[in-house]
Each structure stands twice: as C-alpha cells, then as structure tokens.
Image (spheres, grey):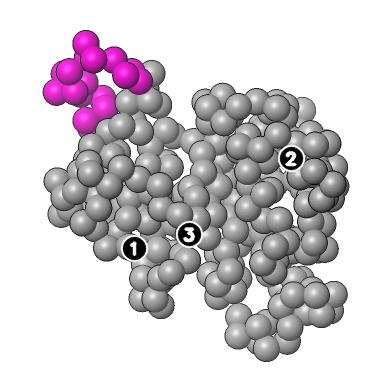
Amino acid sequence: MKNPPALELVDVSKSFGKSLIIKGVSLSIPRGERHAIIGPNGAGKSTLFNLISGRFPVSGGRISLNGEEITGLPPFKINRRSLSRSFQVTNIFHRLSVYDNICCAVLWSRGYRYSFWHPLERLRDVRELAESIIEQIGLSRKRDVVAGALTYAEQRALELGITIAGGAEVILLDEPTAGMNRSETDEAVELIMRVTKGKTLLMVEHDMGVVFGMADRISVLVYGKILATGTPEEIRGNKEVQEAYLGEEALDATA
C-alpha cells in the first residue's frame, strides 16, 4: 500500500463570523518534502498554519497527518502525533538558560512533564538529548546564557531547537528568517536545512531567495485560495502567479 502523505488538507475552510478567510484549500505534502507557502499579506498563511496545528478549529474540510485525521484535535494532541511548529514571534523562556529551555521541551517529549520527583541530574536521556540539540543549533558556547540575552538570530535558533526537541517528523516554520539581515538569514537557512534533514518541512516565508533556495515545491496562497502549486521553476514561470503576487522583478531576483 502506498504511504500516505505526511500532511493532507482536503477542502479546508475557515470563517471568522461572516468573513471567509480560508476558502477550500486542498494540499498534499509527501513525507520528506520541503514545502513553502507564499502569498501577499492577508492571504491567510498564518491562519492556515493555525488550522493545521489545531490552534484554530476548521470551519469545513479535513486535515490528516500521516494518514490519520487530526481535524478538531487540540494542539497538544497533534504535537504528540509528531507535528511541531514555530511562530512569527519568538516563543521561548527568556529568563531560563539555553540548556533549560531545551530541557523543558525534551522533558515533555519524553513524558516527564511537571514531574518534580524526577531530578534532572538523574535523567541521563534528557540531558544527553538536550546537549545534542544545543550542539546542532550551534549554541554550545551559549549553553548557560539566559535566553533573553541572546541575539535575535540566536533566539530564533533556540526556538528551532525547541521545535525539534520532541522528535517531530512534520515541522511547521512561520517566517523563520523574518527580521534577519542577509548573513543571519544565510546562517538560519543552513541551520534549518541541516536540522530538518529527512523530515517534512512546511514553511511560510516572505524572503523569496530563501523560498526558492530551500523549497522542493511551493504553493501560492492568494485571498484564502491556492492559486498554484509546483516546483520553484514552475512557480517562477507561472504567469498567474506573476500577476497576482510575485511580479517579474521578484521572480528575476530569485533566478
């Protein structure tokens, strides 16, 4: 039997009152694919992420993760089924160290949660995994630094570490390079490519250089609908996409 897609959306819609924001989105993402969603501000990209991760309930349609329907499940149950996400606004514990931030995420993924009778120094599996993740995200030298004292790019790297700490196979990244300069963006792209290797990646990103450099396929969301889905080359050559969103100059910049 053919493996089901890592993530599948079938005719998904979302209304807020009388306003229909997501209008029958269907999308199938194979396992291991790096998929980008692009579109103008207000297109519904973050709303779509919130539907997939369970933060918002869908108004219609269904969502499946690895062949199992997750429509209507709360975020923590979706996370336990191997999906994790980051947010546009950095979501870390600013008063805890880098190490403690990662340990918090690892504790939950290993089922310890708020278990005060399990001293951390005795949880070798947690400590070893936390140290490994810190090394992967390039923050070994900042291991004991309070997260709030990190640079913005380092905080985003830490958030990525928290995102992957649970061992999720499907990862959603919401504008992972927003607010970064070019050198920081290049480092962030290299990091994302490295730590998500072999996993399924769905990202929203406004930097077209990042999108066309990272994505295996791209979906263009305009006014709550998928206008086109295809390889970077197909999207670059799509006249409808040029007219509705990218424009020839933006496409030329990614060539």
Q: CA distance from mark 3 to mark 2?
A: 22 Å
Write the residue at 69% across / 69% down: 40
User: Which residues make up the magenta segment?
Assistant: 112-128
Instruction: Answer whether residue 124 is visible to the viewer in this image.
Output: yes
Amino acid type, residue under disc 3 in the picture: Pro
Residue that badge 3 annotates: 176
The local secondary structure at tag 3 comes to loop
Of the pair 89 and 121, the residue shown nearer to us: 89
Above or below residue 200? Residue 73 is above
**Few, some or many C-alpha atoms within 10 Å of disc 3 (few <14, some 14-19, many ≥20)?**
many
Tell me where residue 78 sits by quadrant: top right
Q: Gap between marks 1 and 3, in whole Å?
A: 10 Å
* Magenta stretch: includes residue 189: no
Q: Is residue 172 above or below residue 221?
A: above
Residue beneath disc 2: 8
Residue underneath mark 1: 153
Direction top: furthest residue: 117
Chain-order first, disc 1 or disc 2: 2
